[in-house]
Amino acid sequence: MPLRSEDERALGSRFGRAVRRRREDRGWSQEQLANRAELNRSYMGEIERGAVMPSLATAAKLALALDLPLAELIAQCEQLAG
């Protein structure tokens, strides 16, 4: 789903950066994370760029693939706002 407001775009951007950081910390490619989360690689790229806002179910898949509690992934996203 395309982002609409400035706040939604900023949130999407922060979430994408948080996912990218965790992925890069593990030394994984976008394709590796996408496969682990059962997502399309191009959609993974859109998430990391902040071009789309993933659903809660997709965020949970990403957190599971990154071996994180969903709350921790969201907290990391919020920390990028400060």
Image (cartoon, rainbow, N blue to C red):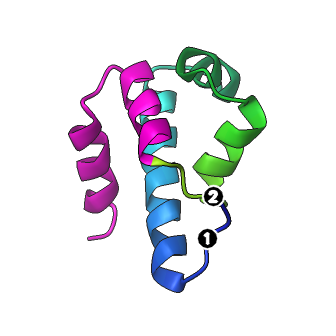
Q: Residues within 10 Å of mark 1 (few under 14, many from 20)?
A: some
Rendered view: 69 above or below 35: below
Residue farthest along the right direction in this orientation: 42
- Is 7 drawn above or below residue 73 in the view shown? below
Residue 32 is one of the magenta-drawn residues: no
Q: Dot 1 lies on which element?
A: loop
Quadrant placement of the C terminus: bottom left
Please report contact status of discs 2 and 1: CB closer than 8 Å, yes or no.
yes
Q: Which residues are magenta?
A: 56-82
Could you tell me the amino acid type at mark 2? Val
Residue name at image x 44 percent, y 60 percent: 14
- For label 2, the residue is 52
Identified at 67% across, 61% down, the residue is: 51
In primary-sequence order, the first of circles 2 and 1 is 1
Residue extending farthest to the bottom is 6
Q: Quadrant of the N terminus?
A: bottom right
- Is residue 63 highlighted in magenta? yes
Q: Is residue 37 left or right of residue 66?
A: right
Give the residue pinned by disc 1.
3
Tell me: 36 left or right of 63: right
How far is mark 2 from mark 1, CA to CA?
6 Å
- Hey, what amino acid is under mark 1? Leu
